[in-house]
Image (tube, coloured by chain):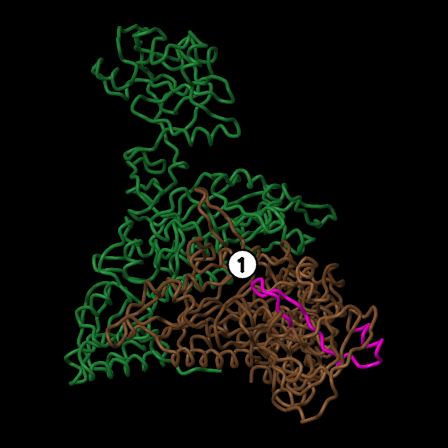
Chain colours: A brown, B green
Amino acid sequence: MAHAVHAQRMSKLMLKTLRDDPADAETASHKLLVRAGYVRRSSAGVWTWLPLGKKVLENVSRVVREEMDAIGAQEVLLPALLPREPYEISGRWDEYGDLLFRLKDRKGADYLLGPTHEEIFTQTVKDQCTSYKDLPVILYQIQTKYRDEARPRSGVLRGREFQMKDSYSFDTTDEGLAESYRLHREAYQRIFARLGMDYRIVSAVSGAMGGSASEEFLAPAAAGEDTFVDCPQCDYAANTEAYTITVPPVEGESHGPVEELDTPDTPTIETLAEHLGVPASATLKNLLVKVDGEITAVGVPGDREVDLGKLAEHLAPATVELVTAEDFADRPDLVRGYVGPQGLAGTAFRYLADPRVAPGTSWITGANKQDTHARNVVCGRDFEVDQYLDVTVVEPGDPCPRCGAGIELDRAIEIGHIFQLGRKYADAFQLDVLGQNGKPVRVTMGSYGIGVSRAVAALAEQTHDESGLCWPREIAPADVHVVAAGKALQTELALEVGDKLAAAGVRTLVDDRAGVSPGVKFTDAELIGVPTILVVGRGAKDGLVELKDRKTGEREELTVDAALARLTA
Amino acid sequence: MAHAVHAQRMSKLMLKTLRDDPADAETASHKLLVRAGYVRRSSAGVWTWLPLGKKVLENVSRVVREEMDAIGAQEVLLPALLPREPYEISGRWDEYGDLLFRLKDRKGADYLLGPTHEEIFTQTVKDQCTSYKDLPVILYQIQTKYRDEARPRSGVLRGREFQMKDSYSFDTTDEGLAESYRLHREAYQRIFARLGMDYRIVSAVSGAMGGSASEEFLAPAAAGEDTFVDCPQCDYAANTEAYTITVPPVEGESHGPVEELDTPDTPTIETLAEHLGVPASATLKNLLVKVDGEITAVGVPGDREVDLGKLAEHLAPATVELVTAEDFADRPDLVRGYVGPQGLAGTAFRYLADPRVAPGTSWITGANKQDTHARNVVCGRDFEVDQYLDVTVVEPGDPCPRCGAGIELDRAIEIGHIFQLGRKYADAFQLDVLGQNGKPVRVTMGSYGIGVSRAVAALAEQTHDESGLCWPREIAPADVHVVAAGKALQTELALEVGDKLAAAGVRTLVDDRAGVSPGVKFTDAELIGVPTILVVGRGAKDGLVELKDRKTGEREELTVDAALARLTA
């Protein structure tokens, strides 16, 4: 049953634009999506999508759905209200900590609001698939997710209730998983290209999810909460956790013997470098930690910081703690502020070091005596390294591992994540299918996410200008925004043009509001950010209208017919 | 970016049909939706929609969306996770009792999972609309709702997490509300007609929602949890709560004087009627209750039951309780089992009565003495009725208020509800807009719901047969189900035909599964319930296929080209 198609009239649209930024808004997308009437805050990190916002959200969902369908993924809809048991089996009921919204039903049974659905998809496939012939299978849903963020902020960029596309692949072989991963990677490239998103694919170290190959899709934006390594010379880009330094080989060089230096009151690198008048990079900093309770030292150049997160990631599942005053009290051989590896590395403690502490390099470091340091302490001659680890904080200018140029650190929004989970969940839920040889085969999985509501905010961040939002056409709430700037003549013509465009399949918004000045209408049109603005103004009596490109600001006056022909071409 | 269109191959579809009904399933829709692989239970009353089920759910949503858009309703998306405060203001935080899923966030703040969204829509409009010029407005969403049902059952017919379309209208005048209500009523008629639903519109008494005009859309089905009054002679239909009896005028008739009867051990109507050898309808039953603590009697013919729910509804906001042994102990004038209104009605207690207890009618009733009844107790002569109330349980054969024929009581599923809320929520939230005269006007609201996931189950209930599901075309998961019944020749032709149909825009499923017998494929096709089945079998070598109508079972053999022409016409 077809209904007559009309343009959306702004006189009938529930829309209240605001001139002022919301008091708590810090990012452009938060300010503009609220001011232009796309979203309104319901509670902290929980948002209502108003009519224009719902259209944009739906457009993003449609693109995602089409590209997921195109790789043969099957759409399903899982509940958001989930029982505790499967999350106990995976361990995530506890691991998620305060991030998980937990609740009880009337009978006192425990439930949670799904943050992601690995457990339930695994159970679903265990129920539905029994043979290798049933695989591979890729399932996806576009659904509401919940995370009780400690500091929900930046509007819909990081909410506590949000829309996400999550998909999961199930294969019997590693090659199959690699293929499902490749299909997703390519689908994501098409999705973000269609959305008009500027993005980078960076290799990522898995976080709490556990697993192997993993890449993030990052949208560079000042408002982003993620920092990534970007090479200005080549196409290298990486999550800071995934960046690896390259150390040039050390030239054979002879060093003098170890020599003690009287360095009173220099327990920090800063005080030491100043006292000796040497750069911090000439000194060797030895950070003491306890790895599963055992004292361990981490040696890095004095100008570098140890990233404790990276260190913990490298040493997992061992626990890593900083040493305390009591630990020093128990170990008089370790002189706080004056520890050096010479004579101790490998005996008093395990010695881990940054790759820059390469064999043949010479350092100023603690002499293991109060108020005393040593110089000419040579790696490989005066101490040995038990294990090299890349655990320093990345800094701008560090070498690109691909071309050697100084890298940059940029801010970005994580808009997608693809991840070879492997058999972690299949093991937890004993997900086997009957193999070709008649024996059970453990299934291997991938998990893949796109933040659908977040993508809306990321696009707003990337495409807005000082006048307002400025949507790529594919996700804009309309193709054309017709502004009736004048009296009855202009309004009538605007409505006529709008309905003709709508009848031709052009998504059209007509600002037919009575008692609203042309100036306010222009300002609202710029704020709302539909890609083409058609102004019906003074020229209307001569059958002329103005077309304006929202992004470039280019204007052109032409006849109504020419404008219609252009826009429906 | 267009993608090549292919038929959905069952060899790639995640689908496991079951031969046996799930152990806990009682209704046809529950059994068949599970057996045909549309849904799977996640936890009590919480369901996963598998690929075929998601398609049907999406088709229902699309029809609803198109018809809501056609009446100018604007789609939004409100959160499911809602703060406590607005529900405190409306009183529903408490009123909902155990039906509400409640939870706390990491800071201990109270939240709920939305059962319906009157409060939040009211707040949204208060935020967005300031003038009578901004109204009327109709907003809707298709969204996940939550109700912690005590006995979730019947599959997706009554879930604890479910999909619902809820809409809300906002007007400044009663006439405006009536018009928004009419628009919804007509949209609902179009929606249910398009869905292929057999439905009745019945007037309904509002439940916990409070308000005035209200109608329910009921889908007659044996599995329904609602009973409604249906006239077999005319088009009268009503919710049992809304049915009103019509009492023929009592002919002027003279009755003898009140006469006492010795009726030992007859404290119930049953024992009394048997003892006296009269029909129960000749006796007057007096039910004693406390209304706000005051003893009140309700007189109904002895063959009728009082519907305590109806009684409470009529007397709200007063509380209604049954009298206890202590109450009798306090009131020696009330002889338990032998109460009559004569001499007591209007003095010892307020006397409410069923309209059948009309002036001039004569009754056998208690004589207010142990083991004694009285006959010839005439209404209007021997006792007066303080208030007539229609509070008896409706029974089959009761008179149709429109044509007088004996009504039937049928089971149905409530699939929609339209409701003039009036100013209840606008009062609670002080929702005013500036009126035409410059003074604030209180807004009047309507609320309207369609159970989207429930509609899927209701259609399954109404349209299935002994072989399986049997979908109306508009919501079927596909238009055509091609069965490859044979070897490579048949499979190749089936896929070719399927892809040609798909390319022509016909939604097509091809059963190309290898190693599955034609018999199993036929059984699965009947179970899945796509409206047209195209069998590629023995005739394939001669270019012949068979078309079968799932509903009527009609079969026809024709050439491939003729079949394609027929199906793409």
Coordinates of residue B483 in the picture (x, y in percent)? 23, 74
Q: Can you identify the residue that label 1 sits on?
A: A96
Please state which of residues B457 and A268 is positioned toward the viewer in this rendering.
A268
Q: Give the x, y percent position of residue B492.
A: 24, 84
Above or below, B383 against A446 in this view is above
Q: Confirm whether residue A197 shows in the render.
A: no
B365 to the left or right of B418:
left
Residue B384 versus residue B567 in the image, above or below? above
Along the line of sight, the residue nearer the viewer: A86 or A527: A86
Q: Residues within 10 Å of mark 1 (few under 14, many from 20)?
A: some
Residue B97 placement, left or right of B358: right
Q: Quadrant of residue A56?
A: bottom right
Q: Is A295 within the magenta?
A: yes
Quarter of the figure with the N terminus of chain A? bottom left
| Residue at mark 1: chain | A
* Near-viewer residue (A133 or B446): A133
> Which of the pair B472/A294 is nearer the observer?
A294
Q: Count the marks: how many?
A: 1
Residue B413 horizontal/vertical position (percent): 36, 48
Q: Quadrant of residue B557?
A: bottom left
**Residue A424 among those drawn in magenta:** no
Q: Position of residue A185 (x, y in %)?
A: 49, 80
The amino acid sitting under disc 1 is: Tyr
SS for callout 1: loop
Residue bounds of the magenta highlight? A270-298
Q: Is residue A35 left or right of residue B222?
A: right
Left or right of A239? Residue B412 is: left
Please name the residue shown 31% across and 41% down the image.
Answer: B231
Residue A190 appears in view: yes
**Which quadrant does the C terminus of chain A fall into?**
bottom right
